[in-house]
Image: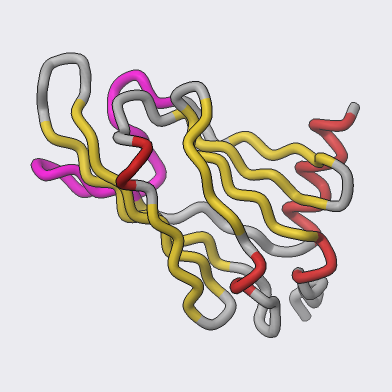
């Protein structure tokens, strides 16, 4: 039930997944082999967005607030030894405070935590 509610919170706040880039291909809406779909959940007052991303180097994970977006950068290699470079942008509703987002790499997943108080509610499309 918490997962369903977190999905509603993500949708309510207009959080959108971005693009993943590898050294060989740029993919839109798909992930490299072995990577799953973006997962959302709630932990206390945080919206948690997790991207299964095996092979990334934990020390390479960087989060860059950019207006109402969060840019994620990381590098690593997959099980075949191919270089992976992740450049993902999470677009938050206009006016959100992206500087409050935090990123970590936990158990093969890139995890972004954003306080719900930092998110502006997305306005319904007219």
- In this orientation, which residue lies closer to the viewer: 100 or 54? 100
The mark tally for this picture is 0
- In this orientation, which residue lies closer to the viewer: 25 or 43? 43
Task: Indicate whether residue 25 is drawn in magenta.
Answer: yes
User: Residue 43, image x and y in percent?
Assistant: 82, 40
User: Residue 113, image x and y in percent?
Assistant: 66, 50
3 shown above or below 114: above
What quarter of the picture does the C terminus occupy?
Answer: bottom right
Task: Indicate whether residue 30 is drawn in magenta.
Answer: yes
Q: Is residue 44 at least partly visible in the picture?
A: yes
- In this orientation, which residue lies closer to the viewer: 103 or 18? 103
Q: Which residue lies at the image location 50% right of the left edge and 22% below the top edge?
A: 107
User: Residue 24, image x and y in percent?
Assistant: 9, 41
The quarter of the picture where residue 122 lies is bottom right
- In this orientation, which residue lies closer to the viewer: 67 or 60? 60
Q: Left of 97 or right of it: where is 54?
A: left
The quarter of the picture where residue 18 lies is bottom left
Q: Left of 40 or right of it: where is 110?
A: left
What colouring does the structure picture have?
secondary structure
Q: Which residue lies at the image location 49% right of the left edge and 30% below the top edge?
A: 109
Dominant secondary-structure state across the stretch colored magenta: loop
55 shown above or below 95: above
The range drawn in magenta is: 20-35
What quarter of the picture does the N terminus occupy?
Answer: top right
Q: Is residue 27 at least partly visible in the picture?
A: no
Q: Left of 102 or right of it: where is 79?
A: left
User: Residue 97, image x and y in percent?
Assistant: 68, 77
Q: Left of 23 or right of it: where is 49?
A: right
Q: Which residue lies at the image location 75% right of the left edge and 50% below the top edge?
A: 47
Q: Residue furthest top?
A: 79
113 shown above or below 12: above
């Amino acid at each position: 039930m918490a997962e369903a509610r977190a999905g509603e919170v993500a949708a309510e706040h207009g959080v959108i997944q971005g693009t993943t880039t590898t050294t060989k291909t740029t993919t839109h809406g798909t992930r490299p082999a072995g990577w799953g779909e973006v997962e959302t959940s709630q932990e206390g007052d945080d919206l948690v967005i997790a991207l299964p991303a095996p092979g990334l180097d934990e020390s390479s994970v960087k989060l860059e607030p950019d207006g109402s977006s969060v840019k994620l950068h990381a590098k690593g290699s997959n099980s075949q030894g191919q270089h992976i470079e992740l450049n993902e942008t999470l677009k938050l509703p206009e006016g959100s405070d992206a500087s409050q987002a935090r990123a970590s790499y936990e158990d093969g997943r890139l995890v972004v935590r954003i306080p719900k108080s930092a998110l502006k509610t997305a306005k319904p499309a007219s």
